[in-house]
Image (spheres, rainbow, N blue to C red):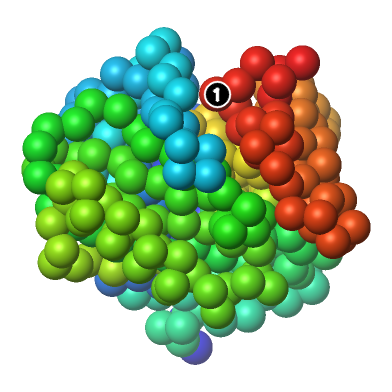
Amino acid sequence: MASERPTVLVVGLGPAGACAAAEAARRGCEVIAVDRRREPGRPVQCAEFVPSLASVEAQALSESVRQPIRAMLTFVEGGTPDAKEDFSGRMLDRAAFDAALVAAAERAGARCRFGVSARSIARDGGVALSDGSTIRAAVVIGADGPRSGVGRRIGHVNRRLVETRQITVALARPHDATDIFLSAGIPGGYGWLFPKGTRANLGAGVEPAHKARLKAIVTGLHAALIESGRVGSDILGLTGGAIPVGGLLKPQGLLGGTLALLAGDAAGLTNPVTGAGIAAAVHSGRLAGEAAAAWISGDRAASADYEEELRAVFQPALDRALERRRELAARWRAGAAPDRAALRRGWIAYPEYWA
């Protein structure tokens, strides 16, 4: 069995992993990065929206934006939508975005391998890959999603998840807002229609206990939008997946003498209310690559500094979202479905959320 000893191994080549690989390589590390998928960004498991204020990789963004977004429309229990006009952003082609980030990592010197997964991670930090090779690195960066194998090995796992289902449909007419559908009939989540040129992503997320209802929920949203003449009846694509909604995990640990860092969804950085995670993945990936390089150069405070920086940047927003999520969950536990006021308080477009 072949054995390699790079200084950094990155597991996962989504935005967090690709940015971590690029940053570590730019700082002189020998980087191997692996991903179980066959190509970057596919299958797409994302609604593909990035708010304008989010800090993401500029070149990759310019290559993958498919439509600007002007506003957010929020429908509470199917009523007249409330418009938030100052909520601009961009709809991405996530596959193109991920591919551009991987290309940047490769230009920086990282060796990126697709169709290769981390089959097992030993307590001493050795990683057995699905291609039969073994990697022993000074730093392992887990950017392997909400059910991270690296996170599981260091005991820091996302325990609260939302399950999602998303279809691609044709838009009947141009649209430049993200539509949000809040309802007691979508427990623990919300529905969305995100336009992307002539098509749109239409989906919903729910608590895992209600996963069996997801198909019917999305089908119902689709039927209502067909009836209102907004979208076509054909389903042009289907995807889905899990989103972590439990907040920031401890993003670092030791496996023998190997430092393990978590970034992106693996670190629980996805917003527990909106599910947004692209910008956090990019930012945390960069910081993880920087911390890996510092650790390798002898800075043993680098892992704690990484955690401190993540908490400083993301903790306040995550804590607020967690509190709003818990408020809605408490109503469900008490046997009372959330009313309009509770739904508004639980969504970012309303001043009640920020009170």
Q: Residues within 10 Å of mark 1 (few under 14, many from 20)?
A: many
The answer to which quarter of the image holds residue 311 is top right
Q: Position of residue 312 (x, y in %)?
A: 75, 21
Q: Residue at x 60, y 21 (%)?
A: 350
Residue annotated with mark 1 = 349
Q: Secondary structure at mark 1?
A: loop
Could you say which quadrant of the image residue 32 lies in? Answer: bottom left
Q: Which amino acid does the dot numbered 1 rest on?
A: Ala
Does residue 253 appear in this view? no
* Residue 300 position (above or below residue 72): below
Residue 344 as seen in the image, left or right of residue 90: right
Name the residue at the right extreme: 334
In the drawing, does residue 255 fall left or right of residue 276?
right
Residue in the picture at 19% in, 31% down: 175
In this rendering, the count of numbered labels is: 1
Query: For this rendering, which residue is in front, 319 or 120?
Result: 319
- Which residue is pictured at 20% across the width and 40% down the height? 196
Horizontally, is 34 left or right of 333 in the view? Answer: left
